[in-house]
Each structure stands twice: as C-alpha cells, then as structure tokens.
Amino acid sequence: MRLKDKVAIITGAGSGLGKAGALRFAEEGAKVVIADYDSKAGQEVEKEIKEAGGEAFFVEVDVSNWLQVQDMVDKTVKKYETIDILINNAGVTQDSFLVKMSQEQWDTVIDINLKGVFNCTKAVASLMMDKGEGKIINTSSVVGEQGNVGQTNYSATKAGVIGMTKTWAKELGFKGINVNAVAPGYIMTEMVAKVPDKILEKLKSKVPFGKLGEPKDIANAYLYLASSESDYCNGTILDVNGGISL
Ligand code: CAA
C-alpha cells in the first residue's frame, strides 16, 4: 500500500499507459481520478477498479480545455478534499511526414499533449503549494529526446514536456512539490499498434531486449515517482525504453 489514501488524478486513464497506472495505483491504495475525454472507456476503468475493491471516480475532461480542467479539479476536491498526485499522461499521435502534416494535425497534438499538461499542472499547482507537498509526473517520450520520422508534432510536445518538467522542478520545488517525468519507449498500446508492422519490426530490433515494453512497465515508473520512495527526485526524466536510446 505505497499510496494509501493518496488522491491521484491520472489524465488519459481510460486506456493504455494511463489505464495501467490507474489500476496499479488503486492496488496500492490510492483514490484514483480517471480523467479522460472518452467517457465509455473511463467509466469502464472506474468499474474495474471498484469491482476489485479499490476507490476510483471518473471525470470527463478534455485536457486542452482550461474550463474543463478547472472543473475536473473542482470535482476532485469536492469528492476527495485534496489532490496529492497528478499524472499528466493524456496524449495523442497524429503521425505524418513534415511536408504532409496539416495545420490541424499540428494543432491537435500541441493542444492535447503540451497545452493539456500546462493546463492540468496550473490547475493543481496552487492547491499543492498551499499544502507544501505534491507529486507531479509528466509523460514525455523517447521521441522527445531523440526525434522520430513522422512525428514533428508529437516529438515537439514531448521535448516541450521535458522543458516544462525541469522548469517546474525549480519553480515548484521551492514549495515542496516534486516534478518529474517518465520517458517511455515503444510500449505495446493501441497508440503503438497503429505503427506499420514493417517500421515496428525495425524499432523492435533497436531495443537490446528485442521486444516492446508493456504498460505495466510505465505504471511501475509512475508508482515510483508518485510514492515517497522518490522524495529526493526532482526534475528527473526517467527513461523506460528497454535501452532503445543507447
Ligand atoms: N524509419 C525508416 N523508414 C521509415 C520510417 C522510419 N521510422 N518511417 C517511414 N519510413 C519509410 C517507409 O518504410 C516507406 O519506405 P518505402 O517507400 O521504401 O516502403 C516510406 O518511408 C514511406 O512510408 P509510408 O508509406 O508509411 O508513408 P505514409 O505517408 O503513408 O506514412 C508515416 C508516413 C505516418 C510517418 C508512417 O510511416 C508511420 O506511421 N511511421 C511510424 C511513425 C512512428 O514511429 N510513430 C510512433 C508512434 S508510437 C509513439 O509515438 C509512442 C511513443 O512515445 C514512442
């Protein structure tokens, strides 16, 4: 019970890495706010956690919308009185070669992956500053560190997330808040399943283990950075990529 009674908002918790994090956090005793714009998926995760004896609560939110994010925070505080942990996990891809990338593809990915992280962190920061503690974990990516063919928009957001993580580690660290990021490699989720097989095989061959990661690998990294075990980590970018970046 490494997160007993801690209140954790996880954005994008309806599927993929966020869902794995939500299930793991609930097992560890957290009260989990499943924040997602897909209400069907989010409600199913809430149900799954409750059926397993955990505590969870679904909030429908588009993280790129400031008013909806404020509403998410208000609903969380109304239900659980506080917020201890924020996992900025929500993210999308709209892959395309630079010359073919539309304005819409650029804007959508920037709005969700970058502005969404700004919105959610801004919305919880004052509350955590008043408490003098809190854990904020952002989801970056190996492609934010290395770039990737077809991901101008996505890699820009994931590099931006690293910049925000380090800035907030300095700015909010003074107030007792830890801000860190996880940078996943290629993890077997619906997002990665969209990559053409031929390209995925090439990527897999670059991992020393020769295989993709699993959502639980990232959920465990989220757990470490959300627990008291990481109390002296601040501004850390935790690579969980099987060594693809070596
Ligand atoms: N490495 C090498 N060659 C590549 C390549 C890559 N990463 N990406 C594309 N190519 C090559 C293709 O093999 C193809 O070559 P051939 O003509 O010789 O067959 C050529 O470029 C054209 O590719 P497509 O036919 O696929 O062109 P498209 O316009 O239909 O699609 C694309 C372009 C959208 C970039 C597509 O190739 C694609 O989806 N690539 C994968 C992008 C990717 O890696 N996304 C990661 C998603 S997972 C994620 O983002 C999570 C995370 O945090 C890591």
Image (cartoon, rainbow, N blue to C red):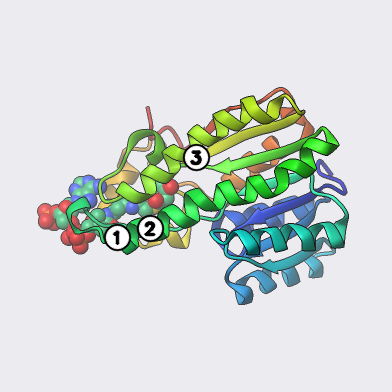
Q: For marks 3 and 2, give the one nearer the viewer.
A: 2
Q: Secondary structure at mark 2?
A: helix
Say which residue label 1 marks: 103
- Where's ligand 1: which quadrant? bottom left
Say whether residue 96 is left or right of residue 33: left
Say which residue label 3 marks: 161
Name the foreground residue: 50 vs 9: 9
Q: For marks 1 and 3, give the one nearer the viewer.
A: 1
Say whether residue 186 is left or right of residue 120: left
Answer with mark 1 or mark 3, whichever residue precedes in sequence. Answer: 1
Residue situated furthest bottom in the rendering: 40
The image quadrant that residue 77 belongs to is: bottom right
Residue situated furthest front in the rendering: 67
The picture places residue 11, in percent across and down from the top left corner, at 62, 56
Q: Are marks 1 and 3 in contact (CB under 8 Å)?
A: no
- Quadrant of the rendering where the C terminus is positioned: top left
Residue 198 seen in render: no
Answer with mark 3 or mark 2, whichever residue precedes in sequence. Answer: 2
Name the foreground residue: 106 vs 39: 106
Residue at image location 58% in from the left, 42% down from the top? 138
Q: Secondary structure at mark 3?
A: helix
Say which residue label 2 marks: 107
The picture places residue 49, in percent across and down from the top left corner, at 76, 64
- Mark 2: give few (<14), some (14-19) or many (20+) Cα within 10 Å: few
